[in-house]
Image (spheres, helix red, strand yellow):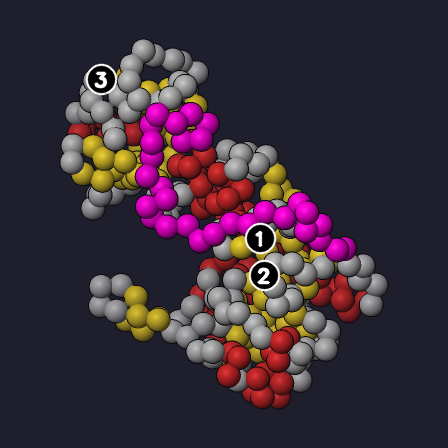
Amino acid sequence: MKIVFAGSPSFAVPALESLIKANKNVVAVFTQPDKPTGRKQVLTPTPVKSCALSNNLPVYDFKKIRENVEAVKALGADIMITCAYGQILTQEVLDCFPGGVWNIHASLLPKFRGASPIQSSILSGETHTGVTIMKTELEIDTGDILLVKRTEIGNMTCGELTEKLSLLGAEAAVEAVELLQSGNAQLMLQDDAKATYCKKINKEDGKIDFSAKTAHIRGLIKAFSPQPAAFCHFGGAVLNILNAELSGEDFAGKAGEVVKADKHGLFVKCGDGTLEITELQLSGGKVMKAKDFVNGRKIKVGDFLD
């Protein structure tokens, strides 16, 4: 079975690496074009492209895959596995693969169809999430399900959960190919009545309202960590909050008020309790533990975060 792999960010790299390691017949890799990055705007390949080149695989970085259908068809591949590729596939592209196009999606479909499934699972207070391998259709994330892998969310930030789901997706990719090769794949229809949708998140969505419930604020902070980062203001500067936990203690005070600041950490009053901030970053500064921020910045009880 000839396989094309399509992906772009680092999230997709373990899936490609696993397919290569499992000796699956990856004949080509599709990815997004190189982009300028950094202050010097150096033209930089995607992580998937770098991985493919290091494994001597042919790479196609079409600006628009829909305008290169003949090149795709000429590869003669049976299936395509996609993972955060970043381009919408037309029916003409889907038709190039007689065995189907199969996407690695980072949620338990039909929950959290769309652009931000990992962040949304944390924001919604889910206890579990996972990856779903589904058959790609023209509508977004609506295709039949080939397999699902679940995991607990626990206390993880988005960054930590993304890394775990990336590895889980790698396992799922190999299993999916083996199921398709065996000819015994059993597909499950998605229940559209249970579908939820999530949009792309923006930096401004991470503004913290300390009058909200502590559980909501904690979820927001973890969902936006490390990027684009939940934030508030302190002393006229932007303060990114990268991790926080519910406090076992409660204090009198107003929303946003620092109610405890010592060698143990930084505690802020919220709408229904107290939040312990554990990791933060002042705009333009380095990431640090909250207790170090307390020591170095002299933040004190009675100060306000807004």
Q: Are marks 1 and 2 in contact (CB under 8 Å)?
A: yes
Which residue matches tag 1? Answer: 113
Q: Is residue 218 above or below residue 257?
A: below
Disc 1/disc 3 C-alpha distance (Å): 43 Å
Residue name at image x 46 percent, y 62 percent: 9
Per the rendering, the mark at residue 301 is: 3
The magenta segment: 188-217
Type of amino acid under label 2: Ile
Type of amino acid under label 1: Arg
Q: Is residue 35 left or right of residue 257?
A: right
Per the rendering, the mark at residue 140 is: 2
Mark 2 and mark 3 lie on one chain; the one further toward the N terminus is 2
Q: Secondary structure at mark 3?
A: loop
Per the rendering, the mark at residue 90 is: none
Disc 2/disc 3 C-alpha distance (Å): 49 Å
Type of amino acid under label 3: Val
Q: Residue lying furthest front in this view?
A: 193
Quadrant of the image occupied by residue 73:
bottom right
Q: Is residue 239 above or below residue 87?
A: above
Residue name at image x 61 percent, y 64 percent: 139
The picture places residue 20, in percent across and down from the top left corner, at 61, 68
Residue name at image x 62 percent, y 80 percent: 92
